[in-house]
Amino acid sequence: MTAHYDARETREQAAREADLFSRLPDVLRGAMTAPAYAERLRGLDPASVTSRAALAGLPVLRKSELPALHKASAPFGGLVAAAPGSFARLFTSPGPIFEPEGRQADPWRGARALFAAGFRPNDIVLNTFSYHLTPGGFIFDASARALGCAVIPAGPGNAEQQFELIEAYRPVGYSGTPDFLKILLDAAAAAGRDISSIKRALVSGAAFPPSLQAEIKARGIDAYQAFGTADLGLIAFETEARDGMVVNEDLIMEIVKPGTGDPVAPGDVGEIVVTSLDPHHPWIRLALGDLTAALPGPSRCGRTNMRIKGWMGRADQTTKVKGMFVRPEQIAEIGKRHPALGRLRLVVTRQGETDAMTLKAETGTSGDALREEIAASLRVVTKLGGSVELVRPGALPNDGKVIADER
C-alpha cells in the first residue's frame, strides 16, 4: 500500500500548522458561545491564539472533570452551544459523559485510519464494536461508510450468528477489539467455520501486544491499531510503515507534563492533550489522561503529520499517602519552584507499617542545602514529609511517570 487518503496527508508540516492555526480563532469564538467555555476562557481574544505557544497558555480541560460538569449541566456540561436535536445521534459513556455525533460526513474522522489499514471502497467490513448507547460501534460504522464500505453491524458476542453472516457476506475487513478477533478466530477453528475472507483489521479499545499481533498475522490477517476516544473519535492510527501512529488531520495534539498544561521536551513521555477543529462540537485542550511520546520526523509511508509511539499508560497517577491524596500536579509545582531540576519522581513505599515518600530529582549539582530546600518544598506542597534523593541527569526513566506507588 503506497496511496494516501488525500493530499492533505502529505503536505508540508508547516502548511498544516498554518492551516490549523488560521482556523483555530474561529473555532475558539464558536466554543466561547457555550457557557462553560465562556467561563473557562473569559477575557481571551481568540485572534491572539495563532501558535502552539499561544495555545499552551489556555487552561487544560481534563477528561476526569467531564462527569461532574455533565451532571451539573446536562447533557454536555455547558461545553456545547448547539442544541442536542441538531446532532445525528446521542450517546453516553461511563461517568456519565454524554457524546453527540455530528451530521456531517465522517463525523469521527475515521475513514483515513481505515484507508491506512488497507480498507477500500466497496469492501465489506464486519464491525464488532458495541452499538448499544456508547458511540464505539457508530464511530467505526460511520467511518467505514464514509470510505465507501458496506458494514455488517455485528457488535460483540453471538459468535455463532456472526459465523453465518461472515460465510454469507464474505467480509474482507474486521473492526473491533483485538481480543474479540482472537475469540472469533479460535471459535471458528474449533467449530469448523470458514471466516477466511477476513484479510485485514483495524483494532482499538484494548492492548494489542506483540505476541497477539504475531498470532493474528500468522492466521492471515493484516491488523493495524488505532487510538481514539468516545469524545474525539479517531485520534491517531498505524500505517503500513509500522513506525508509530500518525496523528489524524483536523486535530492539534500536544504532549504535556502530567498534571500541567506545559509541553514536554521533544521525545519525552507526557500526557496527550487534543484540540479539535470541529465547529459543531469543538474540544479545547482536552487532556485525555493517556501517555505517549512524539517520534522524530515524518513516517516512511509519506504521511507528514506528527507521529506518536501510541498508548503508553495513564497520566493520572494520583495516590493516597498517610490518608492524603498526592497528585502529579503537585510534583510539577515542586519542579516549578526549583527550575534547575530535571525529571522528578515521587516513590511511595512502606517502611514498617507506615507510608514513606522519597522524591527523586535529577540535577547536575548536589549538596545537603539543595536537598533540604527541595524537601521543604515537598512538605509545603503536599503537606507531607518525605526524603529527597538527588540523581544525575538522565537517571530517571523517560516514561511519563511522576508518582510511583511501590507499596
Image (spheres, rainbow, N blue to C red):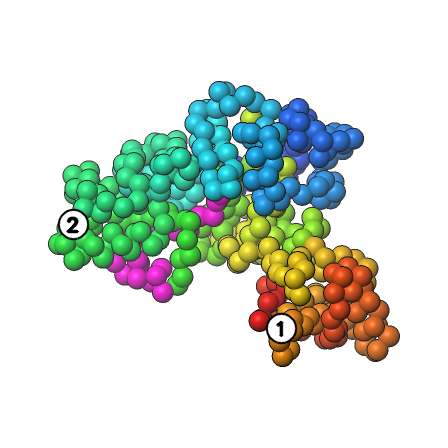
Residue bearing the label numbered 1: 349
Residue bearing the label numbered 2: 194
Q: Which residues are magenta?
A: 211-230
Say what secondary structure mark 2 lies in: loop
Toward which corner of the image does residue 405 lie, by quadrant? bottom right
Disc 1 packing (10 Å; few <14; some 14–19; many ≥20): some
* Magenta-drawn stretch contains 384: no
Q: Residue at x 51, y 42 (%)?
A: 95
Residue 66's spot in the image, x, y percent?
58, 39
Q: Residue at x 34, y 38 (%)?
A: 120
* Magenta-drawn stretch contains 221: yes
**Toward the viewer: 327 or 308?**
327
The kind of residue tagged 2 is: Asp
Say what secondary structure mark 1 lies in: strand
Q: Residue at x 20, y 54 (%)?
A: 187
Residue 223's spot in the image, x, y percent?
35, 52
Q: Is residue 369 left or right of residue 200?
A: right
Residue 349's spot in the image, x, y percent?
62, 73
Q: Is residue 220 left or right of residue 96?
A: left
**Toward the viewer: 143 or 317?**
317
The kind of residue tagged 1 is: Thr
